[in-house]
Each structure stands twice: as C-alpha cells, then as structure tokens.
Image (tube, helix red, strand yellow):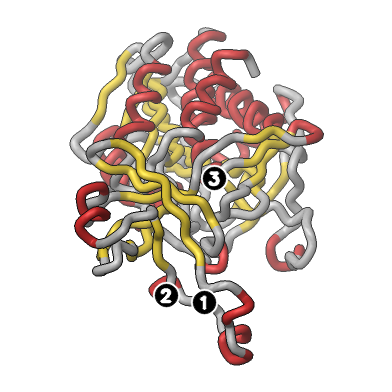
Amino acid sequence: MDLSAKKFFKEILETPSPSGYEQPVQEIVRRYVVDFADDVRTDLHGNVIASCNTDAPLRVMFAGHSDQIGLIVSHINENGYIYTNTIGGWDPQQLIGQRMTIYTANGPVPAVIARKPIHLLDQEERKQVVKQKDLWLDIGAKDRDEAAKAVAIGDPVTLELGYQEMRNGLANSPGMDNKTGLWVAMEALRRAKQRGGLNVALYAVSTVQEEIGLRGAITSAYGVNPHVGVAIDVTHATDCPTIDKTQEGDVKLGGGPVIYRGPNMNPPVVDRLRAAAEAAEITVQWGASGRGTGTDANAIQLARGGVAAGLISVPNRYMHSAVEMISLDDIDRSADLLAEFALRIEADTDFTPR
C-alpha cells in the first residue's frame, strides 16, 4: 500500500458519513480519484461514480458503500440532554460509556453517552439489557436553550472517530464497515488503470445509504447499468472467541479477501474471481450465503433486467462497534484481486450461467 493510498484510507475513516449524511466523505473521494479516473460524477442520490475506458461496450461496476451507522438527534429535553434515534443497526450495549460527536451547522460538538453508575443500579436494573431509547447524549449544556443553540433536531451523530494501528498489520476504527470496501473499489480502479490494458468500461462507485436498505446501490446500479457488478463489503471475522464457525465460516484477519458463493453470486463471476486470485497468487478465503446477502451485491444483482453479481468481503472483527478491526494486508490484496479480475475480462465475455 503506497503512502497516498494509506493517507486516503485514514482520511475517510476519520471523516463522518452516517447514512444520508455522506457528503463530507464523498468530497474526499472525489478529490482522490480525480487524479486517475477518466470521469468523476456525483448523482442526485449522492453516489460518487469514478470511471475509466467508458467507450468500451461491456460495463463492470465495483461498489463499496461510504456510509456508516450513526445516530440522529430527535429531542432535546428541558435540562439540555439530547435523545436520538438510530441510523442503521446498533447494539445499544456498544454505546454505553462512549465519546460521541454531533455534527452541526456550526461544526462538531463533543458529547458523551452513558447511563447511571453501577453504584446506583438496583438488582433488577443490573439484570436488564439497556434500551437505546433510555440512553441520552450529554454535551455539558445547562438547559434546553443552551443545547438548542448548539444542536438542531436532525443533526447526525457518530462515535468519536479515530484510526489506530496495532500489531501484525492490523488496524481498528469506527466505520471500517464500510470505508474498507469504498477504499478497495477506488484502489482497484486506480490499479487497473495504472497497469493498462482494460478491455471493459470500469466504474468504481462509492455508494450511499447501504446501512438503511442498500439504497445507493439501487440507484447507482440503475444509472451505470452494468453487465457485471462486484460489491465490496465487510464480513465477520470468526477468529475470536464465542463465534460459531460451523455457522459463520472460518474467516481470519490476514487470511485474504473472502469470495462469496451462493444464489446472490453469478457463477461465472465467482469462477473468474477464483482464476484472478490464482493468476495473481493472492490467497483468498471462501464464504457462503444461501440467500440474497445484506450487501450492495443484492441490489446490484436485481438492477434493471439483472446483473452478473459478485461479492468480495474484508474480514472484520467486532462489526458495528467503536473498535472494528481489519488487516491492512487484506484490503491491499482485495484491491489487487479486483484489478486483476477487471483486466482479465475480454470485451465479448459472456457471464450468462450455463
């Protein structure tokens, strides 16, 4: 991973993008890809679409979603405490005791989210799982008037953002789901363009609103109208305690990208991803899903008259938490794999299952 690519990765992780509020991170994406893409545009939904070799008749789309889970301000009470609704799927236990940031028209406002101390919980309360509606944000305001001058209903909220590298090439940050997939999509486009020899029109899309229903993939796939579409998302790493590998598979950080098989995935696409990995000597892992996945691959497959879809996943420990952990080698190999995949497609390749 070169220095500019790594800088881009850190920058998008440290930039907020709750679903529906992806504009700050999309500006960073546009600024990065303009140096190598033939064309960069943003559609009315907010998807950023970078492309190369667009005169070629066969269209290939890589999609990684830019949005992350978050909260949205819904109420300010008389004492200045702030209540929220969720954006995306949260385990409320992950929120207790976290530093948060509210993004307002006047800039970011620091906040904390907690509950009363254990000393003050009675025996019944200690047994109960906390509900999100019973948690509040504290910005240190004296009353509602002071809080309302700083924060407005509808302002988005994230966990305090930050990037931290660890041993063995691992890193953690909120929003690895799915800034990793966004990064891989753009890097795959850059690497394919850099190597030269593309026979297809290649589109890399930073999609929006995946966490609330794959919404950006639906609209961008309709607009691009690809013949082939590969989504890049995260999947659960199972190399930590308490996860049942018999149901979730054997997936390790640092074990390479995960290629998925199942009804959501076009068999010729899967075969070509396998062949690309072998040709580039990239170690991969395998995953399976017996239904439409909860990823952009689902929306892409069903776009218009149907798309030959694939799914590459980055192993992720502790998904939807403040400490989502990935391997930097895994995302680097994922970008190389997809660049190789794109470069090996001929202009007349038929992806119809036989």
SS under mark 1: loop
Q: Quadrant of residue 147?
A: bottom left
Proximity of marks 3 and 2: CB atoms separated by less than 8 Å = no
Q: In the picture provided, is 18 more to the left or to the right than 6?
A: left
Residue that appears at 73% across and 56% down: 238
The CA span between labels 3 and 1 is 21 Å
The CA span between labels 3 and 2 is 23 Å
Please name whichever residue, 207 or 126, is drawn nearer the observer in this view of the structure: 126
Residue tagged 3? 174
Residue tagged 1? 130
Q: In the picture provided, is 187 more to the left or to the right than 56?
A: right
Q: Amino acid at mark 2?
A: Asp
SS under mark 2: helix
Is residue 162 something that shows in the picture? yes
Residue that appears at 26% across and 50% down: 151
Find residue 294 and report its horizontal and vertical position in percent: 47, 57
Please name whichever residue, 54 or 149, is drawn nearer the observer in this view of the structure: 149
Q: In the picture provided, is 267 more to the left or to the right than 305?
A: right
Find residue 191 and report its horizontal and vertical position in percent: 55, 16
Proximity of marks 1 and 2: CB atoms separated by less than 8 Å = yes
Against 129, is 171 above or below?
above
Q: Amino acid at mark 1?
A: Val
Against 165, is 244 above or below?
below
Quarter that holds the N terminus: top right
Residue tagged 2? 134
Find residue 144 and report its horizontal and vertical position in percent: 23, 61
Residue that appears at 25% across and 65% down: 75
The crowding category of the residue bearing disc 3, from other C-alpha atoms within 10 Å (few below 14, some 14 to 19, many at least 20), is many
SS under mark 3: loop
The CA span between labels 1 and 2 is 7 Å
